[in-house]
Image (cartoon, rainbow, N blue to C red):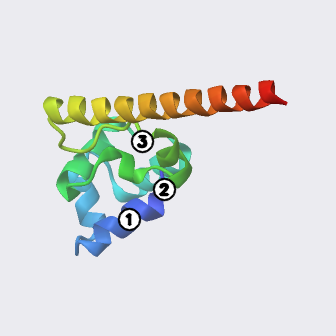
Amino acid sequence: MLEYNKIKSEIEQRNFNLKYFIPKYTDMKPDGFRLACENGTLKVRTLQAISNTLKLPMSYWFLEEDKLLMAEGEIQYGETFPEIIKRLNALLEESMDDKRRMKREIDSLKEKLELR
């Protein structure tokens, strides 16, 4: 779910006036923009235009719970394909290390249980 106030705040923190910014960088009027955010009908291209202008990733605008769900596998803003592959390989290797560690712990526990 998009947070209208977060978008508004980011625009204003960068010394833009919302009533001029929205029509200039999107195809909307400020009131229509607010309503689209509140009703969940904002178009992706509108959010992308805002993100590009403010140099922020699209995911920045979503609620914290949404970001936490996507955090590990999320493509970072501006990442190249080699960087994405490298990061995903590192995540995969970390997962494999965790799996090997858990297997060792399970095997160790099985041995302890058999000794009793």
**Which sits in the foreground, 72 or 25?**
72
Q: Tell me residue 106's x, y (percent).
A: 65, 29
**Which sits in the foreground, 70 or 29?**
70
Instruction: Label 2, secondary structure: give it.
Output: loop
The residue wearing badge 3 is 42
Lower sequence index among marks 2 and 3? 2
Whether residue 72 sits left or right of residue 115 in the image: it is: left
Lower sequence index among marks 1 and 2? 2
Question: Residue at coordinates 35% horizontally, 31% vertically from top-left?
Answer: 93
Instruction: Label 1, secondary structure: give it.
Output: helix
Kind of residue at badge 2: Glu
In which quadrant of the rendered view does residue 56 lie? bottom left
Q: Residue furthest right?
A: 116
Kind of residue at badge 1: Lys
* Marking on residue 3: 2
**Which sits in the foreground, 111 or 59?**
111
Is mark 2 in CB contact (under 8 Å) with mark 3?
no
User: Which quarter of the image is occupied by the C terminus?
Assistant: top right
Q: Is residue 81 above or below residue 26?
A: above
Q: Nearer the viewer, mark 2 or mark 3?
A: 2
* Residue 1 visible in the current orientation: no
Q: Tell me residue 71's x, y (percent).
A: 43, 44
The residue wearing badge 1 is 8
Kind of residue at badge 3: Leu
- Distance in Å between CA atoms under marks 1 and 2: 9 Å
Whether residue 14 sits left or right of residue 80 in the image: it is: right
Lower sequence index among marks 3 and 1? 1
- Distance in Å between CA atoms under marks 3 and 1: 14 Å
Question: Residue at coordinates 16% horizontally, 29% vertically from top-left?
Answer: 81
